[in-house]
Amino acid sequence: MSDLHIYCETGAIGDIAISICRSHIAMEAWGHTKTIIHTSPIFRYGNPPQDKPYNSDCITILQHCNFIKDIVFECEHDKPETIQISKKYKCQITQPIIYREKQNILDWINLKNFLPKEEFKGKVAIFHPVSLANKPSKHLDDYIPEWDRCIKTLIQNGFTIVMVGGENDPIHLTMKKTTIEKINNKIGLWSQLESLAFLLYRADVVVSCDSWGAIWGPAARIPSAIAWGYRMENNIDWWVTGFIGNKDCYKYSWSSQKDYCDVDLANYLGRLNIKERHV
């Protein structure tokens, strides 16, 4: 029995889904049985770089993954050698790039204890309209999609829509007030872990901006409509989608294209033949 040693950022829960998939792919390819995560207590992002503390929700998710053996806070961004060699384990830390076409992150994690108590009948769509957190300041407008047509299509097809996100998300820039009034708004009422658990175990479809829902929906093989932002559209971050795979489960468009993106994703949602999930 041997362990995979891998470096992972622990600042954003979308990145954690990528890291879990990336780790399992490499672990399986190289014949390991468990994974040890090496990370930093500081999350560094953006250009120019900005620092903030790691996200404790990321650690909670990793602790509920059945092949994660240990999480080691020993990496320092200004000391590259700490990201390459583990001081605790005296071994190399890897950053493998191996892709896989299909997988299901639900095979490896269990977050059911975080499910909100509130129930919704019938087909349910989880909706994360916009997030500007950690996004490049020069390109914020390219991360603000439009959603009126998608919401109309979901309602016409019998979906209950549950909206999640951060309290500072500018949802009013993404749709009309009359559209917002038709949605079950849980922003500020559910924690991030509750919102994630609801996506994983209760959502029949995911509709998401360029944020965590756009990663976790496809990773769990839930049909997903995604409005990617600037860095995906310009092929800066696109490479990470190879770790998620499951390209048969989602449709994407570019949020910078506003109404066209809305039309494109609404057409996808209108063609879906969705039955209620029972997880």
Image (tube, rainbow, N blue to C red):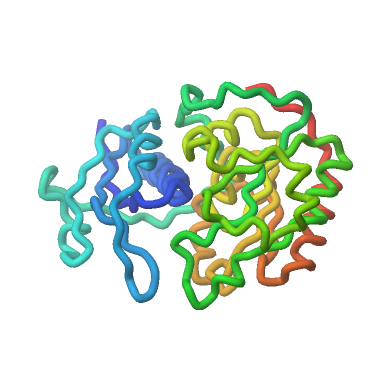
On the image, which quarter does residue 206 sit in?
A: top right
Seen in the picture, residue 227 relative to 274 is either above or below; the reply is below
* x and y, in percent, of residue 17 in the image: 46, 45
Residue occupying the point 46% across, 31% down: 108
Residue occupying the point 64% across, 53% down: 129
182 lies left or right of 49: right
* x and y, in percent, of residue 54 in the image: 31, 50
Q: Please state which of residues 90 and 168 is positioned toward the viewer in this rendering.
A: 168
141 lies left or right of 266: left
Residue occupying the point 40% across, 39% down: 28
Q: Quadrant of the C terminus?
A: top right
Q: Please state which of residues 223 and 58 is positioned toward the viewer in this rendering.
A: 58
195 lies left or right of 267: left
- Residue reaching furthest to the right: 156
Q: Quadrant of the N terminus?
A: top left
How many numbered discs sit on the rendered protein? 0
* x and y, in percent, of residue 118 in the image: 62, 24
Seen in the picture, residue 200 relative to 130 is either above or below; the reply is above
179 lies left or right of 76: right
* x and y, in percent, of residue 222 in the image: 66, 39
Q: Please state which of residues 265 and 54 is positioned toward the viewer in this rendering.
A: 54
Residue occupying the point 48% across, 27% down: 114
